[in-house]
Image: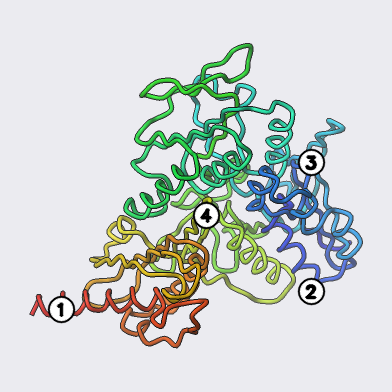
Amino acid sequence: MSERLVVIGADAAGMSAASQARRRRGPDDLEIVAFDAGGYSSYSACGIPYYVSGVVADLDALIARDPATFARDFTIDVRLRHEVLAIDLDKTAVLVRDLEGSSERWERFDQLMVATGAIPVRPPLPGVDADGIHGVQTLDDGVALRSAIEADRPSRAVIVGGGYIGLEMAEAFCALGIDTHLVEAGPQPMSTLDPDMGALVAHTLREFGTTLHLDQRVTGFDTVDGHVVAVVTDAGALPAELVVLGLGARPNVALAQTAGIPIGPSGAINVDRRQRTVIEPVWSAGDCAEKIHRVSGQRVAIALGTHANKQGRVAGINLGGDYATFPGVVGTAATKVCALEVARTGLGEDEAAAAGFATETVVVESTTRAGYYPDAAPITTKLIVERHSGRLLGAQIVGREGAAKRIDVLALALWNEMTVAELVNVDLSYAPPYAPTWDPVLIAARKAWQRVEATRAGSR
């Protein structure tokens, strides 16, 4: 009898692992079956806001591979609408419920891949389970939200939370002509940015038509006949026909934790560099699994599709009999907020301080193209560097078209532990349609190095 790999979760991490394992071991050697409670496999969760807004019209465009493709091209059995209810490590089996047939059965495994992803934060507030309140975590969620908008034609929506999803949904709703309000408990939206950079995002949201309610905490939801009619905050009630929760996500580890699979300090499943848990036949990857942050050295839980695919690939290579390790992350992310591009990598000011670094910061204003070239647009670049050494610790960029992808240069510098002195002389490309003679990244690096040298001189 061939060895059997069971995968819990048929999206980025799980199916990357399954595909890599299959490339190395044929179906006579390794049977692979994947279970997922949702209705879709291997899809782009990051594309959901654009599907809701109609920018992406075709749902199938977000799906990389469906179960039929996995069966035909990879001999992988993907069973959607099948929820794993329990993991029995002694029995080496998982209890699976067919959500359409309502039947339950135990499925054996020799190797188990836990790729349960993340679940949206849903605070236990009065009325939170009312109709009209939506999360946006899975493609099923996106389909339900778009269907609700098309059916109900809401004129007013309230978004709770100013993270990536919240901001992208604000853009989507404004584009649809919906009166959009966003409630954020902090002083600025996008807490992954430092407040000074978040303020630039807030300005653009207001320009685009979103009403911001900052420094306000949601305390509950008013309902009529089971449907939400208002979001209640500590500053009053905001009428709402539609509500989206954008409060972030946390690792979906309940299944693993109940089974006795160790959870790490970040709240995600503890794994080694090969994506193995301490339980020998159990592996994990993706949003539910820990990562090592290459700058802080700490174990972190960061929910990004890029990390999920890479961790899944590493797990699959090892499951297939070869050897690979996952080297960690620096937390690089980018998003579009209306006409604004926003990106970050590494540590913010507070994160760097919490990790024990003494820092210097610089914020530089420049343009995305040569100043004389048509459509040159503003770009703000912020660098956080280690005092005295000048090592780059983090970066944030907010600007117009052509801004966000510059973060990749800074992510590579972080990856290789470069100082800003080294970064100043990196040979970046130049042409007036793409950059000034001194690229904004290089200007910021030069200013940061000047700050470091002045600090050194002052300490002598």
391 to 278, vertically: above or below: below
The image position of residue 286, as x and y in percent, is 61, 57
Query: Which residue bears the numbered disc 2?
Result: 24
Q: Which residue is mark 4?
A: 339
Q: Earlier in the sequence, mark 2 or mark 3?
A: 2
Task: Find residue 92 and report its horizontal and vertical position in percent.
Answer: 73, 50
Residue 121: x and y, percent? 52, 38
Which-is-in-front pick, marks 1 and 4?
Answer: 4
Q: Answer few, some or many: residues within 10 Å of disc 2's Cα (few below 14, many 20 plus, some between 14 and 19).
A: some
| Nearest-to-viewer mark from 3 and 1 | 1
Q: Between residues 235 and 176, which one lies in front from this camera angle?
A: 176
Q: CA distance from mark 2 to mark 4?
A: 44 Å
At 45% from the left edge and 51% from the top edge, which residue is drawn?
A: 266
Amino acid of disc 1 = Arg
Is residue 18 shown left or right of residue 449?
right
- Give the labeled residue for mark 3: 82
Count residues near mark 4 (Cα–Cα under 10 Å), then give few for <14, some for 14-19, many for 20+: some
Distance in Å between CA atoms under marks 2 and 3: 27 Å
Of labels 3 and 1, earlier in sequence is 3
CA–CA distance between discs 3 and 1?
Answer: 61 Å
